[in-house]
Amino acid sequence: MNAPVLTQLHLGLGSFHRAHQAVYMQALQDRGDKTWRIVGGNLRPDMLETVAALQASKGAYTLETVNTAGERFYQSITSITEVISWDQGLSGLVSFAADPNTRIISFTVTEAGYYLDAHNQLDESFADLRSDLEGKTCSTIYGALSKLLHARMQAEAGKVTLLNCDNLRSNGERFFGGLKQFLAKRGDQALLAWVTANTSAPNSMVDRITPRPTPEIRERVKAATGRDDAAALMGETFIQWVVEDHFANGRPAWETVGVEMVSDVMPYEEAKIRLLNAPHSCIAWAGTLRGYTYIHEGTLDPEIRQMAYDYVTDDVIPCLEDTAKPYPLDLPHYRDVVLERFSNSNILDTNQRVAMDGFSKIPGFIQPTLREALAANRSIDAVAMLPALFLAFLQRQQRGELPFKYEDQAMEPAVAQAICAAADPIAAFAAERVLFGPIAGDTRLIAALRQATDRVNSFISESSESV
């Protein structure tokens, strides 16, 4: 009798999952390891056209990757074997969650989608989170998983791993804390006890630049392969996945296809968040202010590239290397590789995509370097440029002068309006605890932001004069 195929149930069929985790599962299957598959679905009724296209193709789609030399490669991905239609009760997802052959439930969520404040407490100011807590809906990661895991508990389907695949620092640990708070607030002590005893939530670090799909990608795929693929997408050739090897009920043999299975993901995660995610935002904000559309344009601008380089070199590396033992990564090399990746003019990654969610990215990506440098009595001149760029970006957004719609799930509109309308916007910005936490209002922060704002204003003036 053949052993059953085991399932990784993934929540969120966006581009990143399909260009990252699904690719690793494909690599396993291409090696002849067919013991695992992916089943996927969304928590909200979005991406309906893409979902329909994936259902029509039984989960198959084409991935285009492109390197810095402009060489393009095409791969058919078939590791997602079933695509679940959305309904308000998430009935399709619930069915798979309650199946004993489902051993991993993974998910891709933006930083703001965890609804955690600076103290890792659930922020109940969000209407969708409150609605989920009241049991009216199940549209957040916590509401959805509580429904899925309740069904699994009732079915006595066994242990399951809850696997984050996103940019939240200490993502597994912080998500798990949020989930337990959610269950406690709902008074669901039985499910809370079951989750504590029967699940694990390993931390992970994911990396691959994956732009939003455009019609041009579909056209290139058709020209190269002959397939008219409505779910086609593209990404860079670089790919990385680092996962703590802490699984509750088995896992695929990912280590055989390049996944780094480690005991502690923190050094890799910290390097990626501070040396990749934060410079990415820096370049997006600065590039938008200079009138660019794409990330590579800003990275190839010597002044913007220098801002990102100085931030990493002057402030981030001294913070990360200020430890008793050597850092496990070559940080200057990591910095240079990242900037080379951002320079890839074939990716066409937009500033709009990368610039989003600044109210989550400043506390998550940038505040730690500000805080640690100040604690060590070091300069914060280079890192202060990043929030100063965001403030200028925010002021432009508030005036309706951005060339695109800005999305920021964690930004309270009244807070942004108050900052920009204040008599002293810099002081108001620096005093915002959502952004700066324990250093909000620090006189050294305010002084550095004033100096950085002068530099940003000069940068913007130079941009205007060159037009």
Image (cartoon, helix red, strand yellow):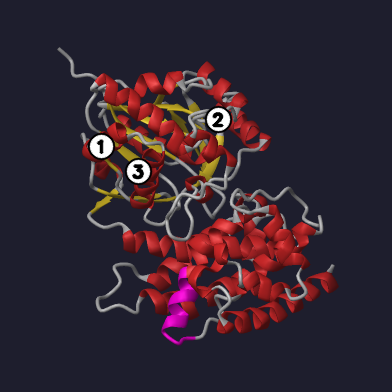
Residue to which mark 2 is pinned: 44
Marked residue nearer the N-terminal end (1 or 2): 2
SS under mark 1: helix
Q: Magenta span has 181?
A: no
Marks 1/2: CA–CA distance: 28 Å
Residue to which mark 1 is pinned: 193
The residue at 24%/23% (across/down) is 157
Q: Estimate the x, y position of residue 437 in percent, counting from the top left.
A: 51, 68
Total marks drawn?
Answer: 3
Rendered position, 120 above or below 310? above
Q: CA distance from mark 3 to mark 2?
A: 22 Å
Of the two numbered discs 3 and 2 on the same chain, state the one appearing first in sequence.
2
Q: Residues within 10 Å of mark 3 (few under 14, many from 20)?
A: many
Q: Does the CB distance between marks 3 and 2 fall below 8 Å?
A: no
Q: Measure the C-alpha gap from mark 3 to mark 1.
A: 9 Å
State whether residue 82 appears in this view. no
* Residue found at x 49% / y 33%: 134
Q: Between disc 3 and disc 1, whose residue precedes?
A: 3
Describe residue 121's horizontal placement relative to residue 69 as left or right.
left
Residue at figure coordinates x 65%, y 38% from the top left: 214
Q: Position of residue 91 (x, y in %)?
A: 44, 18
- Residue at image position (62%, 36%) is 217
Q: Residues within 10 Å of mark 1 (few under 14, many from 20)?
A: few
Percent of width and height locating residue 274:
46, 65
For badge 1, the amino acid type reads: Ala
* Callout 1 touching callout 2 (CB < 8 Å): no
Q: Residue 291 at what x, y percent from top left?
A: 76, 61
Position of the N terminus by quadrant: top left
Residue range of the region highlighted in magenta in the rendering: 368-378
Position above or below: 291 against 138: below
